[in-house]
Image: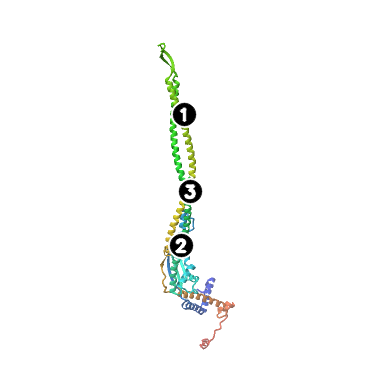
Amino acid sequence: MPEQNLPPEFAEEVIDLRQYLKVLSKWRKVIALGTLLAVFTSAILSFFVLPPVYEAQTLLLVVQATEKQQVFQIPQDGLEGVVGSISRLPVLTMNTYLGQLKSEVLLQRVIDKLKLDPDLYTPRTLSDMIKATVVKDSNLIDVKVQNSDPVLAARIANTLSREYLQLISEKNQEQMTRSVSFLKQQREATEKELQKAVETLKKFQAQPRGVAVLEQEFKKKSEDLADYESQLKMAGVELEQLSAGVARLEQELASTPKMVSVEKLDPDTGKIITVQDVNPVYVSLSQRLSEKKAALAEKQAQVRGLKGVVDSLRSELDKLQAELTGKKVQQDKLQGEVDRLKQTVETLAQKTTETQIARSIDLGDTSVIVVSEASVPSHPVKPKKKLNIAVAFVLGLLASTALAFVLEHLDYTIKTPEDVTRHLELPVVGVIPQVTAQTAKRPSYGG
């Protein structure tokens, strides 16, 4: 298909592509030289200039860790909860363990342990050599140490793990020691308070009218009151009986005549006569009624006396009850304080013992475990020679190609008829051939 029959935009694209190819062909030596120079420079740097870097790797397993940081909350289970929170180690997150691995204190311990040159190795420079990451969805921490010396890289990795476990143990023991000291101080202070509370309770109980004395007195008066109330009840029954007897005798006396007619023999005349004489039944009833009334009066006096004694005892018991209740409240309060302090002393003693036991455990080995120690690496991880050369080749090729187009853009010399058309925008009339010594010797076929 002839070029003049193509669509204008497609023809322009073909022309541009040809121009690009011409530019690449024209400057191919520059492109090749630039690419080779980049590859050669990368090879020199990778093989001879950049020092090899070796990587030693160790793996740690965190036994005690949480996914989220626990927010401090006020314990809800009283004194035991408060003391328990003081004597218990906090549960750390994986990020906390990770941060401790690159702490300045730990890195300085590694430098001191390995006796590294302080001019070359500082906590900051050593931190740049160490990379610690958490393995996804696990409690594993991957620790990598890079150094130009493979043996030193392995030593740093292993020393870092050991010193980390030791540091955790020391820090935990320091905390446990502070907790034990605090618990002991609190126990001693509480024991002093308990001693004072016990002495106060004893003094209160030793009062002349203490709770025990008042209870005995209250018991005795209660028994007396019950006895007198029983007597009063019996006297009341007897009083009713006497009252009923008096009423009955009075009725009988009222219906009995005082005088009765009696037939007698007159001694003077010898005849039987009727005379009025005192009724012996009336006399007997009168006598019995007098006796009953006397007994009734005596019983009434007895009942009044018993009522007075009962009322007096009840009044005394009410006052005694009020006094006893007030002193029992005070004694219960003092006794409750003594019981509370005893419980506090027992709790502090128990937690002190538990904390001392926890302090004796090597918590570094129980909270973090070295899964695998670092071995001496046999191959360097840096520089990556093949990758560097490949990247240098690509970058050199791109840079050289870009340089070729820049040089082409800056080149205003006319070498071809197309240059005349492009730069001068004039039609080409003719071409003068270049005559060289070889072309001059060629035979002419024109004439």
Lower sequence index among marks 3 and 1 = 3
Can you identify the residue that label 3 sits on?
Answer: 204
Up/down of 166 relative to 221, above or below: below
For label 2, the crowd category at 10 Å Cα-Cα, with few meaning under 14, some 14 to 19 and many 20 or more, is some
Tell me the element at label 2: helix
Q: Nearer the viewer, residue 275 or 29?
A: 275
Task: Give the residue type that dot 1 points to.
Answer: Ala
Tell me the element at label 1: helix
Q: Which mark is residue 297?
A: 1
Q: CB atoms at circles 3 and 1 under 8 Å apart? A: no
Residue 6 is situated, as x and y percent measured from the top left of the image, at 52, 72
Q: CB atoms at circles 1 and 2 under 8 Å apart? A: no
Q: Which mark is residue 414?
A: none
Q: CA distance from mark 1 to mark 2?
A: 89 Å
Tell me the element at label 3: helix
Residue 26 is situated, as x and y percent measured from the top left of the image, at 52, 79
Residue at 46% of width from left, 42% of height from top? 217
Can you identify the residue that label 2 sits on?
Answer: 177
Up/down of 345 relative to 282, above or below: below
Task: Give the residue type that dot 2 points to.
Answer: Thr
Of tags 1 and 2, the one toward the viewer is 1
